[in-house]
Image (spheres, rainbow, N blue to C red):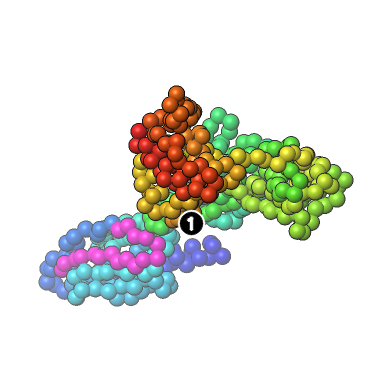
Amino acid sequence: MVNRKSKCQKLFVFLSILYFAQAASSTGATSNVVVEEPEFTDIIENITVAAGRNVKFACSVKNLGTYKVAWMHFEQSAILTVHNHVITRNPRISVTHDKHRTWFLHISNVQEEDKGRYMCQINTVTAKTQFGYLHVVVPPNIDDSLSSSDVIVREGANETLTCKATGSPQPSVKWKRDDNSKITINKTLTVSEWEGETLELTRISRLDMGAYLCIASNGVPPTVSKRIKVSVDFPPMLWIPHQLVGAPLAYSVTLECFTEAHPSSLNYWTREDGQMIHESRKYHAENTIGTPAYKTHMRLTINNIQLNDYGTYKCVAKNPRGETDGTIRLYTSSPPTTPPKSTTTETPSRIKDILGNGNLSNSVYGNPSSLTIHHGEKGSKYQSNLNEIDKSEQKSTDGEGKSVSYGHIVPNGVDSSSGNLNCQLSLWILPIILFNALR
């Protein structure tokens, strides 16, 4: 079939040349007038075009007379047009002219195979020819059939990612991680980008898990990319921040475990006898996915602790690659004791804030020298014990029978009965606080 087609092409070329020769001879035979031979008036410009666009070559001549102009594809040895006639069967080829002065060869929807030299020829006795070159550029394209797709690999194994790209000129390929983190080639080499059609990952770890971008470019827009997801499988691992946890009776406590697993593990809690703990008023289990997504924070809250709640608890993690568990022991502890916080001094601005926005009330909780200030705006509570305003401010009695507190004299005639004590204290306490604050 190929030989037959080649023979047909040669025959067609021969007939075309014969046609040109006959036209030339007839022109010379029928005219005794000496005429100027046709010649080219301009060169044919080389053209660079992206595939899919339309293009046209221009061949300018003068003194054409009865001679004819033909267009040929030199590399393909194909006659495309002769004068006004399209010879090729390629429907994308056409020819026009500007009053026989400029002959245009039109190629629509240019394809990569159209590239090469195009020859404009005048059928004089000795044919005159000139050439123009068509350079076709093709945007990059990634061949999915020859490139890697999403992969799953065991931790510690090696993996090679491949990305095959086509285009004209030949595209260059580089690799990046989708989250812009470093690519670990091996233990001693980490890079932000990697050049080449293949990316080899040695002894891959969970830190290498994620999406990788294969990016192909050749200077012809648009640049294209392919996203390849790398999943790294490994058995569950556990980390327990507190293996011994103390809590008093009737209190609530939260136990914690941190897990890492891929694929995602089944996480649950058991008692020491292996009995699984289910959601109830007593128990509340919560799993929070971390970053990266293979990390999970396990919490178990035990409410209203009773004696039978003390003992051992296990956090368990299972996935297709394996399973593991960790132990936490809950023991009884004494209830926390938090004595009232004593404040010795207040800054002047704070006193001004208290006096300006709050209200004073003298409340006695078994101690007549205890002052409680309720801040009206914020609802916060400040407590000042007069016996602890300053360690050095211990009351003493001088020889004249007067009670002295660092220069603040309390007359002996003051009634200290319980009925008047609150009112009298309110009058004497305020100057003391202001004195210490402004000191």
Q: Is residue 428 magenta?
A: no
Q: Which residue is mark 1?
A: 141
**Location of residue 176 in the rendering, given as x and y in whole percent from the top left corner:** 49, 45
Left or right: residue 89 versus residue 257 is left
Instruction: Judge by depth and name the residue closer to the eye, 122 or 373.
Output: 373
User: Does residue 82 sit above or below 246 in this rendering?
Assistant: below
Q: Which residues are magenta?
A: 47-63
**Residue at screen point 54% across, 46% down:** 418
Could you say which quadrant of the image residue 376 lies in? Answer: bottom left
**Location of residue 375 in the rendering, given as x and y in whole percent from the top left corner:** 46, 52
Categorize mark 1 by other alpha carbons within 10 Å: few (<14), some (14-19), many (20+).
many
Please give the count of numbered marks on the rendered protein: 1
Instruction: Judge by depth and name the residue closer to the eye, 55 or 101.
Output: 55
**Location of residue 260 in the rendering, given as x and y in whole percent from the top left corner:** 68, 44
**Residue at screen point 45% across, 51% down:** 360
Q: Secondary structure at mark 1?
A: strand
Give the quarter of the figure containing the N terminus: bottom right
Instruction: Judge by depth and name the residue closer to the eye, 321 or 61.
Output: 321
Which three-letter amino acid code belongs to the residue tagged 1? Asn
**Residue at screen point 57% across, 56% down:** 144
User: Does residue 22 sit above or below 212 in this rendering?
Assistant: below
Residue 44: in sight, yes or no? yes
